Amino acid sequence: MTLPLFYSPEVSEAMAAGAPIVALESTIITHGMPWPQNVETARAVEAKVRTHGAAPATIAVMGGRIHIGLSDAALDALGRARNVAKVSRADLAACIVSGATGATTVAATMICARAGGIDVFATGGIGGVHRGAEVSFDISADLSELAETAVTVVAAGAKAILDLPKTLEHLETRGVPVIAYGQDEFPAFWSRSSGLLAPLRMDSAAMIAAAHLMRGRLGLPGGQLVANPIPALAEIPHDEIDPVIEQALAEAAAQGIAAKAVTPFLLQRIFQLTAGRSLVANIALVLNNARLAAEIAREIAAARQKAQETPK
């Protein structure tokens, strides 16, 4: 039986031509922002991918199928939809067979991108090890997916509300390459600096693409995490955002907020405490990641094309 994949015309054309494609998640549309800013941002991210020479493939589950790329009408419908499931590895299959509408998280987007033949995925920030995980055991499925699914993920590091040292330690244990782009330090989502040294540094999309292809030739499972720092003009410095995060965490604990409700609460509270500045930074970093992801996808496509043209 074939997978229930439905490609948009734009993505189908890119696939047929061997052109670069960048996968994009859909939870930013359904769970990240209100209408109409959610759709406006999604379209801006898609436009950024196109501007840098790749086809955008926003991924979502709709009508019992995995949509690889959304038409304008489908994107608009998703942006207005209510009670959309937030799907990850555990519930992706159930969402498909039930016919429900599902927005893909980092983990689910990686799975669908891999199934659809896409190598590169741009997001905002990955999930990770939550603060207090030694008690709650709250660790994002994103980390396991990076260890298992061969997709290069471009993000501004892990979300700063997480325990970043433990997140890096977990990724190292699972053998996931963590590559800081253009700097030695691991970025901290809204901030360029985390105070933590990244395991690897690469300064070009070509080198990242070459590493992706070499991992495939070596038969290594899993993907790469490319930690792309937020543009300097858009960042909220670490010493400025950290007290805000601590306040939001304290309020979540005081209100007994736990499990899947923690991250949405924290992001909303940080938005309020920064008077919306965190959202402005979030949009800037997603656009920056879309740009780099398109450049990496172009390099991968060019290398494959060159390999096909080279006499054996």
Image: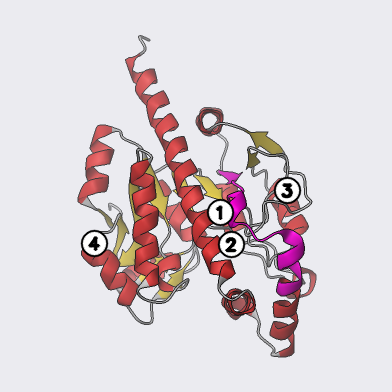
| Residue labelled with disc 2 | 141
Mark 2 surroundings within 10 Å by alpha-carbon count, few (fewer than 14), some (14 through 19), many (20 or more) = some
| Residue labelled with disc 3 | 173
Number of residue marks: 4
| Residue labelled with disc 4 | 72
Frontmost residue, 252 versus 287:
287
Query: Is residue 100 visible in this depiction of the protein?
Result: no
Q: CA distance from mark 3 to mark 2?
A: 15 Å
Residue at horizontal 58%, vertical 56%?
234
Magenta stretch, residue numbers: 224-244
In the rendering, at what x and y percent does residue 105 appear? 48, 63
Q: CA distance from mark 4 to mark 2?
A: 30 Å
Three-letter code, disc 2 = Ala
Residue at horizontal 68%, vertical 70%?
138
Q: Circle 2 sits in a helix, a strand or a loop, which is it?
A: helix
Three-letter code, disc 1 = Glu
Instruction: Indicate whether residue 231 is drawn in magenta.
Output: yes
